[in-house]
Image: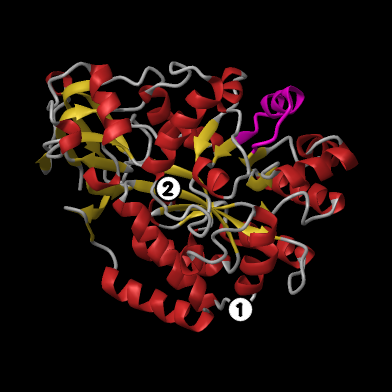
């Protein structure tokens, strides 16, 4: 049934980051937005309506995550990236069962929904369980089933399985097209050039998104530059680029690398929380944006961040960009809000999420303003309001969330699955693993 939402402020997250006052948003029966604009200009509406008291905005887009790793939080937390992976994470992940991955993904999905994250781009194993978990929680998922050449894993078999999955079920499926399947080649240091080329060809043939870690750490970058020139140079040479590609992290880039990403319209998932915790470096956010590269924000996995609160990463992205350039104007509140919404969608080569406009999915977040962050209320200047939202508010202010028009969080409580039961299941898995 069509639904109309009234709000004192609606942020459609258009390119201008407009602030609509006393506005309405209409949702059609298919879960897509049919109208958004000032209440005085609203078309006639037949059906239920709901009056909100705060800010209505698009759901946040987590552009890069490994959310089932909620089960691995705190493991090796004081190690650098490669030691963390090889000594702690990969050996533990080798013991994960499909049920473990389901439990971890449910827990992660709930954490994100309650923080206003409606879409997450995931790279992980046992993709069917990741999908099952997200269908149960009601969130939206862009999945790149992991492809890696490591003991216990067969990259060619993983590639074939993903291609067959897409061929049988299509790129997108589920209620409200909540699930999108693509490819998740781990990195240039865990796959051969031939394997990377085959992944790129398979993805382009199907119009599928490739999610891959790129130039995340300095040791990786040094090794790849000595052998191939750089990670982007290698990925260009082997034919991974040319279709829909998301480069996760992209910390260690030259000017030429940034130009290569721009030329191939490669999106970047900027993960400042993980990159700082693992001392991987600070990505060149200002330069990427100036070059016209689509940049979204990602949490990375909750074992290297260690949470899935995208608001926190958005603020950190802004702080690091400012201090690394010694320029407090290089990225503003409006820029950061757009990176967390439409920017993340653009990095994933999507136009139907991250914005409030007719035809887009009704993935919505209602931010409450009965909070110290909004002590000045809503009747302040637009820039002031956006500043309070981005720099001072955060996950604690999220009250309600809709995905494809379905209310999945009401008053801060998830409506789809039992949160207590999800935590019990996850604790049982952690108890066996640790």
x and y percent of residue 25 in the render? Answer: 22, 32
- Indicate left or right for 337 with 273 as reference: left
Residue 12, horizontal then vertical, whole percent: 31, 28
User: What span is colored magenta in the figure?
Assistant: 250-267
Instruction: Report the number of discs.
Output: 2
**Magenta region includes residue 264:** yes
Hey, which residue is sitting farthest right in the picture?
A: 227
Coordinates of residue 307 in the picture (x, y in percent): 42, 54
Q: Residue furthest bottom?
A: 432
Which sits in the foreground, 389 or 122? 389
Question: Which residue appears at 74% of the width and 70% of the height?
Answer: 153
- Find residue 95 and name its label: 1
Residue 204, quarter of picture: top right
- Which residue is painted at 13% across and 30% down in the image? 375
Identify the residue at horizontal 20%, vertical 16% (top origin). Answer: 381
Position of 184 with respect to 191 (left or right) is left
Q: Look at the image and name its color scheme.
A: secondary structure
Q: Residues within 10 Å of mark 1 (few under 14, many from 20)?
A: few
| Residue 352 makes an appearance in the image | no
Q: Is residue 293 left or right of residue 188?
A: left
Disc 1 and disc 2 in contact, CB within 8 angstroms? no
Q: Is residue 368 visible?
A: yes
Q: Is residue 255 magenta?
A: yes
Which residue is at 24% across, 54% downward?
409
Q: Nearer the viewer, residue 289 or 8?
A: 289
Q: Secondary structure at mark 2?
A: strand
Image height check: is 288 above or below 158? above
Label 2 crowd bin: few (<14), some (14–19), many (20+), radius 10 Å: many
Above-or-below relation of 418 to 244: below
Residue bearing mark 2:
119
Mark 1 vs mark 2, foreground winner is 1
């Amino acid at each position: 049934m069509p639904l109309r939402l009234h709000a004192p402020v609606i942020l459609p997250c258009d390119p201008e980051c407009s602030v609509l006052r006393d506005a309405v948003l209409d949702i059609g029966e298919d879960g897509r937005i049919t109208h958004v604009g000032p209440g005085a200009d609203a078309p006639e509406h037949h059906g239920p309506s709901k009056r909100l008291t705060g800010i209505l905005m698009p759901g946040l887009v987590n552009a890069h995550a490994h959310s089932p790793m909620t089960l691995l939080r705190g493991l090796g937390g004081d190690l650098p990236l490669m030691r963390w992976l090889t000594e702690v994470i990969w050996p533990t992940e080798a013991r994960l069962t499909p049920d473990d991955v389901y439990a971890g993904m449910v827990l992660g999905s709930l954490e994100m929904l309650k923080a206003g994250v409606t879409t997450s781009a995931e790279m992980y194993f046992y993709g069917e369980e990741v999908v099952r978990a997200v269908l149960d929680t009601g969130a939206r998922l862009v999945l790149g089933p992991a492809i890696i050449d490591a003991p216990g894993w067969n990259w060619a078999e993983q590639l074939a399985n993903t291609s067959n999955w897409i061929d049988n079920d299509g790129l997108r499926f589920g209620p409200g097209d909540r699930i999108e399947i693509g490819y998740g080649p781990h990195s240039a240091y865990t796959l051969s050039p031939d394997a990377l080329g085959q992944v790129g060809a398979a993805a382009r043939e199907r119009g599928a998104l490739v999610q891959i870690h790129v130039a995340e750490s300095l040791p990786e970058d040094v090794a790849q530059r000595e052998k191939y020139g750089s990670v982007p140079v290698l990925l260009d040479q082997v034919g991974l680029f040319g279709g829909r590609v998301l480069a996760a992290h992209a910390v260690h880039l030259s000017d030429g690398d940034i130009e290569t990403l721009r030329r191939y319209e490669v999106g970047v998932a900027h993960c400042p929380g993980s990159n700082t915790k693992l001392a991987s470096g600070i990505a060149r956010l200002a330069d990427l944006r100036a070059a016209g590269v689509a940049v979204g924000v990602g949490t990375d996995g909750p074992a290297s961040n260690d949470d899935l609160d995208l608001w926190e990463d958005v603020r950190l992205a802004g702080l690091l960009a400012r201090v690394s350039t010694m320029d407090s104007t290089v990225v503003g509140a409006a820029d950061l809000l757009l990176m967390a919404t439409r920017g993340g969608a653009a990095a994933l080569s999507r136009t139907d999420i991250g914005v409030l406009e007719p035809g887009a999915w009704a993935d919505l977040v209602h931010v409450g303003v009965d909070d110290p962050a909004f002590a000045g209320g809503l009747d302040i200047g637009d820039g002031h309001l956006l500043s309070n939202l981005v720099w001072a508010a955060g996950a604690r202010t999220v009250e309600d969330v809709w995905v494809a028009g379905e209310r999945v969080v009401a008053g801060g409580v998830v409506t789809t699955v039992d949160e207590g039961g999800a935590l019990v299941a996850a604790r049982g898995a952690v108890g066996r693993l640790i």
